[in-house]
Amino acid sequence: MNTTITSLLQMVAERLQATRPIVALDLETTGTNPELDHIVEITITRFNPQSQQFSGIETRVNPGMPIPAEASAVHGIADDDVRACPRFSVIASRVFELLEGADLVGYNHRRFDVRLLAVEFARYGLLNPMETARTIDVGLIFMKREPRTLEAAVRFFCGIDHADAHGTTADVVATLQVLLAQFERYPDLPRTIEALDAIGRDASFIDRDGKIAWRGGRACINFGKHAGVPLDQVETGFLAWILGRDFPDDTKEIVRAALRGELPVPPAMAEAGS
């Protein structure tokens, strides 16, 4: 068990005067959809302030599916790294025990890690051990305490107060001032519109809204009952339904092409052919 984690977690528990077990957790996964993706690495450390005992698990996990290249590019874990590792079904009961009756600490885990774990447990017929857990989300605290408003950005990047905030002309001036200051502060910030446009967008998304995404090198529906199904295996009626609804134009263009038998080309193949 990682001694740095145990000592920090004990300090957190003491600062919070915790009486229930407290768990620090993090996951690496095959993607960013908690309903579809699977765990490839998990670290859980549990501290019981009553007994002063630690327990935990730290292991890579075989997700039972190919790890998409875009996910490997983020966490550095590839198929060969997990081939001999246990499936989640093997460690599920142990993970359940560690989470049961505990409060949770993580970074942006409320919207993702907790949801994905609940789905994993359901796959194996287990109840969700986190139903009564209180969650301390460090990412949410950061967003609350360091607001991402334009006024805060002007103060941080330009060192001035944003006069006439929310006046449209003043806001446009401030936005441009902040962007220029960001170029100065971050020398590695891209200098092309295409690269700046890609910042913060999930690399697996094929269309801008992620209605269609790469999964294992194949273009798949990424929402609703057909989530995870490759475009060329989705019933044509569902694709026609997309065309008749209020979906973005780029999503509809991909669907129209799919109905013609023309599927998106994975980025690696497109680069190889160029």
Image (cartoon, grey):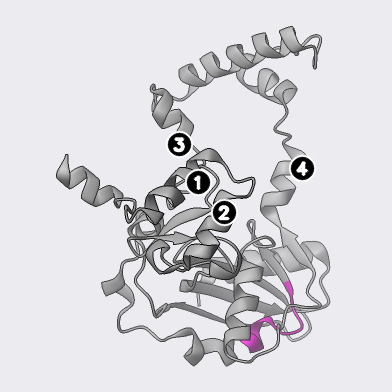
Check disc 2 and give the amino acid type.
Ile
Q: Which mark is residue 198?
A: 3
| 99 magenta-colored | yes
Say whether residue 139 is left or right of residue 261. right
Q: Is residue 98 placed above or below 79 in the rendered structure? A: below
Q: Position of residue 19 (x, y in %)?
A: 83, 77
Residue drawn 36% across the image and 83% down it:
85
Which SS class for mark 1?
helix
Cα separation, mark 1 vs mark 2, equals 9 Å
Contact, mark 1 vs mark 2 (Cβ under 8 Å): yes
Cα separation, mark 3 vs mark 4, equals 25 Å
Residue 80 seen: yes
Mark 4 or mark 2, which has the lower sequence index? 4
Q: Which of label 3 and label 4 is nearer to you?
A: 3
Mark 3 or mark 4, which has the lower sequence index? 4
* Quadrant assignment, res 224: bottom right
Neighbour class for label 1 at 10 Å: few (<14), some, many (≥20)? some
Residue picked out by circle 2: 242
Residue picked out by circle 4: 144
Mark 3 or mark 1, which has the lower sequence index? 3
Which SS class for mark 4?
helix
Check disc 3 and give the amino acid type.
Ala
